[in-house]
Amino acid sequence: MFSYRGEGIFPFPGNFKVTYRCYSVSMLPGQERPFVERGGKIIMPPSALDQLTRLNIQYPMLFKLTNQRSHRDTHCGVLEFVADEGRIYLPYWMMRNLLLEEGGLVQLESVSLPIATFAKFQPQSTEFLDITNPKAVLENALRNFACLSKGDMVAIKYNERIYELCVLETKPGNAVSIIECDMNVEFAAPVGYQEPERVPRKHKQEEEMAVDIPEIPDDRFRAFSGSGNRLDGKRKGSESFSEDKSSNNPERRGIPNYNYKKGTLTFIRTSRPQQNGHGKDEKIEDFAAFGGEGQTLRKKDSRK
């Protein structure tokens, strides 16, 4: 009987500690179990269940996996006790985190983990941003997990694609249980993600207010701009055929409206009321249709 504290991990009294040869789930005989690859639980032999029931075990059963050669460890739950004796079957992503090969030795130890309150993940690809609701997808995927360890690279499947996420942080310890817990989740920027460049607000407003005025080319078409000839051979008069210089001058333009706002229409009214000689406005009578006197071509008969 002993007690040990380290990073929130408390081994059970009568601790279960056994070394097994590990294999990936694809090597398990019988029907395929693809759901095991999408979770964080392992398959153990029946003798392990018999030994665990004889000890003072707390539920749910959680275990610490350690590769003593590479000094790598992680934590997991158990799914079934149907493996061959002396063997355990792990998801492939878990074997990769432990740097284990098929048939490698791994130490299995029963532990108790604190309930998770917070976890932070970092996607390993920017393609994870294409998911509409990543938190809901992650929550659905974590239902197949029993615990999380800081530094693990977990793999989840969504829409026939595999997304890898690195566990950057867990609270209240470096390894936590996520069974029946209320855990807050955060995402760090994916690996390779770059923030888009932001346009300053002042320049953005100036671009919106700017009006595109097309330039008038010098070689544009001008109606009746040629020279004329008279039938009697005389030269044309300057008064009757004087050209309007203002109409041929492409540089002359109206005064721009500096108060113009994009998306609005401005109506310019150029008509002004007529003035009399004294500078006062005359009264403009209301126009009445067919208000004049009529005339007839036939003379009226005076006898009537």
Image (cartoon, rainbow, N blue to C red):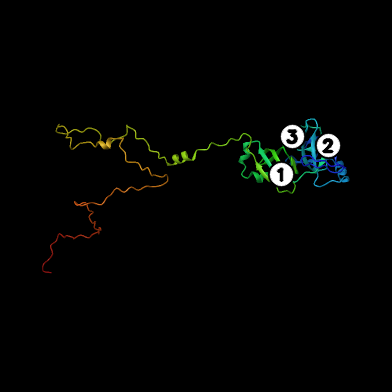
Residue 132 position, x and y percent, is: 61, 44
- Of residues 98 and 158, the one nearer the viewer is 98
Q: Residue furthest bottom?
A: 304
Write down the residue under mark 1. 142
Depth check, mark 2 against mark 1: the one in front is: 1
Element type at marker 1? helix
- Pointer 3 and pointer 1: residues touching (CB < 8 Å)? no
Disc assigned to residue 87: 2
Residue 169 position, x and y percent, is: 70, 40
Q: State left or right for residue 205 relative to residue 171.
A: left
Confirm whether residue 161 shows in the render: no
Could you give the CA–CA distance between mark 3 and mark 2, rounded to whole angstroms?
19 Å
Q: State left or right for residue 226 relative to residue 41.
A: left
Which amino acid type is marked by label 1? Leu
Residue 100 position, x and y percent, is: 77, 32
Disc assigned to residue 97: 3
Residue 111, quarter of the rendered image: top right
Which amino acid type is marked by label 2? Arg
Element type at marker 3? helix
Q: State left or right for residue 45 relative to residue 158.
A: right
The C terminus sits in image quarter? bottom left
- Pointer 2 and pointer 1: residues touching (CB < 8 Å)? no
Q: Residue at x 69, y 42 (%)?
A: 119
